[in-house]
Image (cartoon, rainbow, N blue to C red):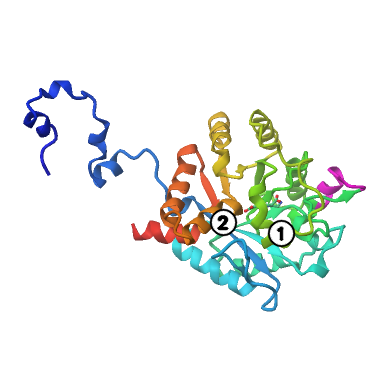
Amino acid sequence: PAAHGQSGEKLGLSTGTYPLLRPRRNRTDSWVRSMVAETRLSVADLVWPIFLREDENSDREIASMSGVHRLTVSEAVEAAGYAQQLGIPALAVFPCIDEDRKNPDCTEAVNPDNLVCRAVAAIKEVVPQIGIICDVALDPFNANGHDGLVHNGRVLNDETIAILCQQAIVQARAGCDIIAPSDMMDGRVGAIRCAMDQADLQDVKICSYAAKYSSAFYGPFRDAVGSGGKLVGDKQTYQMNPANSDEALREVAMDLSEGADMVMVKPGMPYLDVLQRVKERFAVPTFAYQVSGEYAMIQAAGRNGWLDGDAAMMESLMCFKRAGADAIFTYFAPQAAEKLHAG
Ligand code: PBG
């Protein structure tokens, strides 16, 4: 290629009339672009959320999430093996239980032999080195789709916390490494920490969904765990208003003071400003969740040829890193890991 600046001389113009500062010089070739890159995305940044089904007879397909399937326990063990092979550090597991196990008291949530616990134990037996993250919230077990116990149309805070503590304990005893309360009840992190410590589970970590917004982007997830059609009303009395970000800082401060080891911002892409504020203010391990609706949008547009799905996937994940995420929960985890390995 012609040396830079030559064309100016050809035109008889002094190069002095051209820009003195040329940021494009650092973008000429792939090697220099990578040398000056400020942020790197690696497989170690990815957490893979998976959905579980009770058995072969339960639905595998999730209509709103093409490319994602509900897995039986043995399929989940296989998935964990593949994740480990790819270098993905952790899985997050979410159950879709049979309808007849759901009730308003959410008893299945605390059953030590429930789908989540069986899957965690099976994965830990075969793939002990992979981290396992379990949601603490009642929605997959609740007849009305809410994250907490509902009485007279209200979601009860303290009564819910009592169950969440038991749920955390059965999951931790099954082998879960990180308990992730996503329910947004006030005070649950401290209560769960206390309950786990008393149950001799001091090393089990807590990743608090500290800044969790009431979001339309959770729609496909609710299909996946079978809670969407059942949801009575909405979750605005406990999940945060998308208009707020100072409030996110207060939520994070509280959860840290109650013993959270990591905090989460969720959803992801529309909330990168919140992620950045949290990371800058607290300098603690801060995770982001690229939620089901974000996955579905990129996937659908890619499938239709409206955008380059793979490129959009990698760009979105890099942007999470740039905004300050220490790890990213993404349904794209295996695909992204494969691409990162391919270079
Ligand atoms: C349940 C929970 C939700 C998600 C994670 N845990 C849904 C909700 O709060 O309604 C959403 C994840 C996603 O959309 O991918 N407490």
Which portion, as a residue range, is magenta?
A: 152-163
Position of residue 283 measured from the top left corner of the image (x, y, whole percent):
54, 33
Q: Amino acid type of disc 1?
A: Gln
Decide whether residue 203 is among the magenta residues: no
* Residue beneath disc 2: 296
Q: Quadrant of residue 208?
A: top right
Position of residue 260 measured from the top left corner of the image (x, y, whole percent):
66, 41
**Mark seen at residue 62:** none
* Residue beneath disc 1: 171
Depth check: give the residue in front, 210 or 302: 302
Residue 22 left/right relative to 13 = right
Residue at figure coordinates x 70%, y 61% from the top left: 225
Decide whether residue 153 is among the magenta residues: yes
Between the residue at mark 1 and the residue at mark 2, the CA separation in whole angstroms equals 29 Å
Residue 86 left/right relative to 105 = left
Mark 2 close to ligand 1, CB under 8 Å: no
Outermost residue toward the right in this view? 152
First in sequence: mark 1 vs mark 2: 1
Position of residue 153 measured from the top left corner of the image (x, y, whole percent):
89, 47
* Secondary element type, mark 1: helix
